[in-house]
Amino acid sequence: MTADMTHDVVVVGAGVAGSLIARRLTTEGLRVLVLEAGPATPSTFEGYLQHVQTFYAASGKGAESAWPPAIGAPQPDARDLRSDNGYFVQRGPLKYGSTYTRAQGGSTLHWLGVSLRMLPEDFELRSRYGRGRDWPLRYQALEPWYRQAEREIGVAADVADQTHHGIEFADGYDYPMRRIPPSYSDIVLAAAVDGMSVRLGEDEIRLKVRSYPAARNSIPRDGYRPVGAVDIRPDGLGRDLYLGERCAGNTSCTPICPIQAKYNAGKSLARANPAYLTVLARAVASKLHVDPVSGEVRGVEYQRYEDTSSPRHTVHTAHGRIYVLAAHAVENAKLMLASGLGGASGMLGRNLMDHPSIYGWGLAKAPLGPYRGPLSTSGIDDMRGGAFRARHAAFRVDIGNDGWRPTTGAPDTTVVDAVQTRGLYGADLRRYLESTLARQVRFSLNAEQLPSAANRVTIDPRYLDAMGNPRPVISYDIDDYTLAGMAEATRVYREVFSRAGIEDHTDPEHSTWFPEVPYAGGTMRYHGMGHFAGTHGMGNDPESSVVDVDQRSWEHRNLFLVGAGSFPTMGTSNPTLTMAALALRTADRLIAEMGRSSHRQQPYRREQGRSRDLSSGGYTEDRPPEGLGDRL
Amino acid sequence: MTTRLERFLAFSADATAFTRFELQGTGQAREYLDTVVRIAGDTIVDRLLDLHLHAKAVAAASGNSAIMEHLLRRDVLSDPRLGPVARNIVKMWFVGIWYELPREWTEAFGAREGDVTFVVSGTAYAEGLLWRAIGANPPGAKAPGYGSWALPPHIPALAAH
């Protein structure tokens, strides 16, 4: 271990963007310190299984149930939305309905795994439809990094299914793994729905049930080896478990894939070069120190806690040549604002977006076999693009494989209702469960939201967490453009249900509670998709954006803000693949730049033999190496 | 003389329409019996199981199985003291959760220590009969294997009683 503990790059946040950058930079011999605010996620498989047990034993099995937060790194929780006493301070007028996880691995610990590319037209919304903003790069410019991202996180799909709305792939390219088999329910729905058309204004749109690309392991192509469960023991060596190299149908992408057949950011950290990587969990970045003359960042102050159930902590500062904030759209903005770096443009924290979504649920005529397979394997993508975007939001239809769980709490609540209210037992109970649960269908209709300066994250000294850091104060509204899209989505799902012979049981008055929004004399209930975006949007103009096309801060040239916060608009795809592609692109920019200017640094530690190149290894440091932090 | 566990299995088989063999195969019978005894007490559990055996015996003697349903509904499920406990046993088998007894029950018969809603154990969750009743697997456990979800669900036929 060298005495000089200045790092090449300090990354804040061990989620997907930070972990991909750490892996790529350490592979090039750059020394990277990753600060993670939340608890460490075990790199041993045995440790990971403790989280599976936590999930089994939890009476509520929501997205957060396998990942209990630390007092020092509080996080939003879906259960707090109604009571409004959670981590977020919701200023309204509407509630922001999404949550995220502060832990090593971030929200990829419990994401669904869908890995859609954005459409080419999503990058040009302003020039094509006069709405929102254009991106400072086009689809074609990002395409090489989409391919890399699909390999890095391991996406299963067939190009043949994915060429729609002008999505183009490089010649000869196909995804690293074959598509995940569509569910039986997808197959039955497709037989009824494929080819039907719906009208959106002038546009007549033909529908097709389409397989979703997903970061879940499937049958590999061309010598690719799927990355399964990580098991790095305290000796620093990775073991090959031969586990999780195929999705096995555990039906719990959210909140935890028990065999890690689904990508989580821990896999990228595990595949980083351990000699050049230090990961420090339970280290909450609380302030950036900036040189008042040059504007360059000089250090990241962080609070280190040992006990996840206590706010006790010590304060340290980490130094690097380059700083990368990969903490989450909300946390990045919060950290900048807490450091007094709101910026001259006033854009920081603004343009917060999500995919406000509506559920439609019903009963098919015959059993479709829900509650099996990955939680979603197909969707209807045909309303993601088209001329109608000049008038109202585009939307995407997710077909759920988990019945009415998100809308009514089924199947548990179905049993309780059958036994308690209907007085059923024995064969009658069994017949009732078969006749209801096995026929359940659910769509989630996810609408695009445009950037709006009024939708924003701020901080307020009156609202602090247990360690004295600001809690995010959120102002949020859904405009008529998006509401009109949600209304059209509602009409479309009803037409699809009708065509497929699905009896509509959508009844928000008797369902899980969701926030409501008035529209056209009625009320719509919406839920968040966890797709936070837009708080530090990228652009070509420092007046109207926070970062440039490389995600580099306009005002602090050795600082990068990465993740979905950089999205100028968000289209209808879930943001993970695009933020992964952008992160890899940023990493390449950093390598090009730092490789030129630097003398080669010593690794933190000797390189170790690894049992399986590029698929295990990795190093997670539980305490700061000697001399790493300057104790204040 | 049958043991209480055997009587519990006999009642549970009739209450769930899963065979005694299937119930034993979950490995959960002892844990559920212990849970209901711990919270509801010996007297209530024994009474409930005795009434079930009685109903079964009467039905067998008369050769009319519908009598058992009649007696079970009249003497157990409609009984304000036994009914909620019996229903909790059914729910425990299907979901793996002990649900807090209804307030009317607590007001009439006294609050019981430990009577809160809880997952009986991680294994109880994974062994919930609900999943096999609909041809599915408990999320996060008993994965049926790659691609199995593309096939129609296999919903087991009801055992003949």
Image (cartoon, coloured by chain):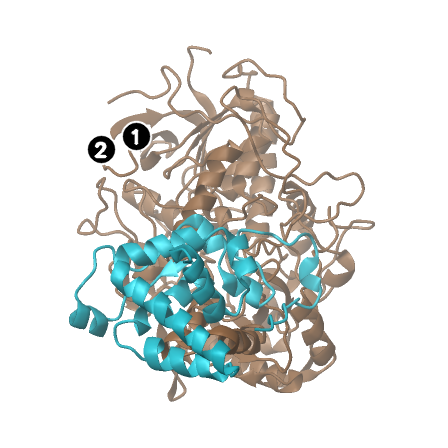
Chain colours: A brown, B cyan
- The numbered dot on residue A625 is none
Residue at horizontal 75%, vertical 45%? A220
Task: Kindly identify the amino acid type of the residue bearing the numbered disc 2.
Answer: Arg
- A24 and A48: which one is in front? A48
- Residue A141: x, y in percent? 67, 50
* Disc 2 element: loop
Residue at horizontal 49%, vertical 40%? A49
Residue B155 visible? The answer is yes
**Residue to which mark 2 is pinned:** A312
- Residue B40: x, y in percent? 27, 61
In the image, taking residue A147 as reference, residue A127 lies left or right, namely left
The answer to whether dots 1 and 2 both sit on one chain is yes
- Residue A416: x, y in percent? 40, 71
**Residue to which mark 1 is pinned:** A306
Q: Chain of mark 1?
A: A
Q: Chain of mark 2?
A: A
**Quarter holding residue A339:** top left
Residue at horizontal 24%, vertical 22%? A632
Marks 1 & 2, CB-CB < 8 Å contact:
yes
Task: Kindly identify the amino acid type of the residue bearing the numbered disc 1.
Answer: Glu
State how far apart marks 1 and 2 are (Cα): 8 Å
- A320 and A98: which one is in front? A98
* Disc 1 element: loop
In the image, taking residue A190 as reference, residue A200 lies left or right, namely left
**Quarter holding residue A500:** bottom right
Q: Classify mark 2: residues with Cα within 10 Å, few (<14), some (14-19) or many (20+).
A: some
Residue at horizontal 81%, vertical 42%? A222
